[in-house]
Image (spheres, rainbow, N blue to C red):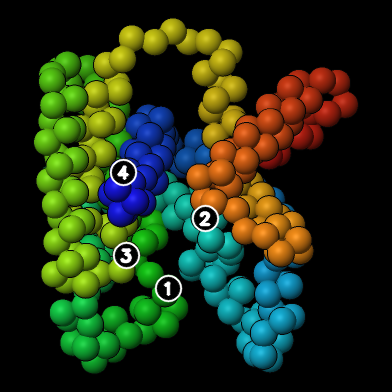
Amino acid sequence: ANFWVGSVLTRLCVPFFFLAAGYFLKDKPNDWSRTRDYIWRLIKLYLLYSILYLPIKIQEYLTNDRPIKDDIISYIRKFFFVGSYAQLWYFPALIFSAFLLWLLVAKLNLKTWMMIALSIILYLIGTFGRVYDKPIRDLLDEIWVFHMYDEIFDTYRNGLFFGFPLVFLGNCFWKKKDVIKNRNYALYFAISLLALSAEAVFVRRVIGAKELDLLILLPVTVAFMFLGILFFETKRSKFAFICRSLSVIIFGGHMLLIYGLSVLLESHGRTLHSMLSFLIVLSVNVLIGVVIIKASEKKGFGWLKVFYN
């Protein structure tokens, strides 16, 4: 159960984020000024949360045995090519995905079938570079292009091989929203989730993969989930907009709270069960988020919107 929740079910989240981002980009990829504004908003969020996590990175660098110069170079490289801290890799990945989508659509005018083919190729490269890589790792290491790539980017879980294909797919859903029919997507999702679970077991037991976040069937499963959600009957409400803002604060701040909780417990010689830790972090994160959102609506506190807008 732990394997299924941690390596299958929760792996649907990030690709769903990318799909949703691509969907709500709407026609922005056709207009550089709107794409630029969107990218700039993401850059500001990335910079803000990178600053919040910087003290943790500094403490990490001060307690290791590496020269400070190497740590600075490493941080700069990761800031631009990997992610300044744990979950923050999502921001540069989405920034790159949005820019690449604009470049291919508005500047290069690639046809839809070419975009689809490119997306599939890129995702498969990412899959075989991260999940199915163990049988071919020695071969990849001998190819200088792959070796140089690993030296710079560390991972294939980024905007090129992971973010862009899903952002493009989400944008396709928006373009075709008027012709997409309401089908039994719940059943399709259930079947694809079972198949995804089987793939996860296969790559863990047979291939010996450690990372399972770029499984081949992952985009298919998330696509059916996303399409099913599209046809939910909902009403626009202030609560929905609060959830949208709250999601950014939860995503940006949860690792900071996890770190703080672990430090607090270790100082008292204690550890916490993962489920209880999850509930505490989530509750505190939501509370802080609601306070920030509500306070940002008050006069003199509008600057707090930088945490989610």
In which quarter of the view is residue 210 placed?
bottom left
Q: In terms of sequence position, does the residue under pointer 3 or pointer 1 come before the other?
A: 1
Where 161 sits versus 8, above or below?
below
Residue 211: mark: 3
Task: From the viewer's side, name the closer residue of 131 and 148.
Answer: 131
State which mark lies toward you, 2 or 3: 3
Q: Residue at x 68, y 69 (%)?
A: 57
For the residues labelled 4 and 3, say whether their Cβ atoms are less than 8 Å apart: no
SS assignment at label 3? loop
- Please tell me how crowded label 2 is: few (under 14), some (14-19), or many (20+) other residues with Cα within 10 Å: few
Place of residue 143 in the rendered image (x, y in percent of width and height, measured from the top left): 23, 88
Name the residue beneath numbered marker 1.
153
Q: Which residue type does callout 1 highlight?
A: Phe
Q: Name the foreground residue: 124 vs 272.
A: 272
Residue on which the image places disc 2: 87
Mark 1, mark 2: which one is toward the viewer? 2
